Image (spheres, helix red, strand yellow):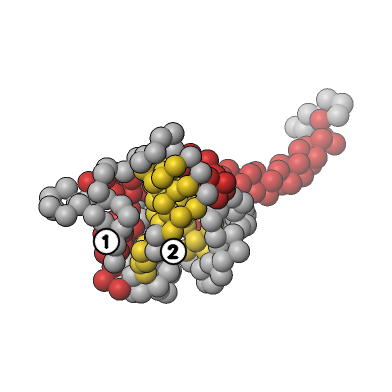
Amino acid sequence: MHRTLRGYKPYKGGILIEFAFSIPVFIILLFFVSDHYRIYELKNKLKTSAYLAASMTQQISNTRSDKQLTAADLARITYACCLNFFHTNTMFNPWPFGISYSINFIYVKRLNSNSYQYQSSWGSTESGVSPVNMGRSVGGISTKKLSEIENVNTDLVCSRDGEEKLFLNCTYRRMLNFDKSKIGLFLLDPQMVKGGMHTTNRYPDLLYYQIVISPKPGLFPARN
């Protein structure tokens, strides 16, 4: 026997309709939350790789009598530090995740209050297909004014003559085959980041993390 309370029958269908409309909204919300967590996870992996890069930079030449770092050292550091996200050689061409990994190493040494020795070097998986032939470069040594150093990063400013600092910029970079689904995103489409070092490059920064350390004496300037 049907219940005859007033208002019961007319609202049975309404509840079902509301429930049917709420399901897509709930699914979209789940995807949205999942995407935010995935981006947080990627940022955390990048932060971890940056601190590992700083540690490896300080320690990689410990067993050598010649402590000065080389282009090969920077390449090895770059490769090792991205293995917490990539596996095998997926950081290289054809970049199955649609992203590559790179580290910029910017070294400065204060000569006087308005003059700094400057060198920019890098390691990258944008080129090459394995650690053996991956991209690497050791830049020439130049002299820059204080204002130019501040434009790179204010934390590079030194407090005394002879002081050295190293700026590491670790990035996941969008390759031409980038697709958000390749890194586990459903709705959010990360755009070119602001504040990165490669915002106008053919392969712009997707995410980046920056850190400044005081390198051990003798590590820099790096050499080929």
Dot 1 amino acid type: Thr
Q: Which residue is nearer to you in this view: 216 or 35?
A: 216
Residue 30: x %, y % from top left = 59, 45
Dot 2 amino acid type: Ser
Give the image quarter of residue 68.
Answer: bottom left
Residue 70: x %, y % from top left = 27, 61
The answer to whether 129 is drawn above or below residue 155 in the figure is below
The residue sitting at 54% across, 72% down in the picture is: 176
Local packing at callout 1 (Cα closer than 10 Å; few below 14, some 14-19, many 20+) is: many
Q: Which residue is mark 2?
A: 100
| Secondary structure of the residue carrying numbered label 2 | strand
The residue sitting at 53% across, 67% down in the picture is: 203
Quadrant into which the C terminus falls: bottom left
The residue sitting at 16% across, 48% down in the picture is: 62
Quadrant into which the N terminus falls: top right
Q: Which residue is mark 1?
A: 70
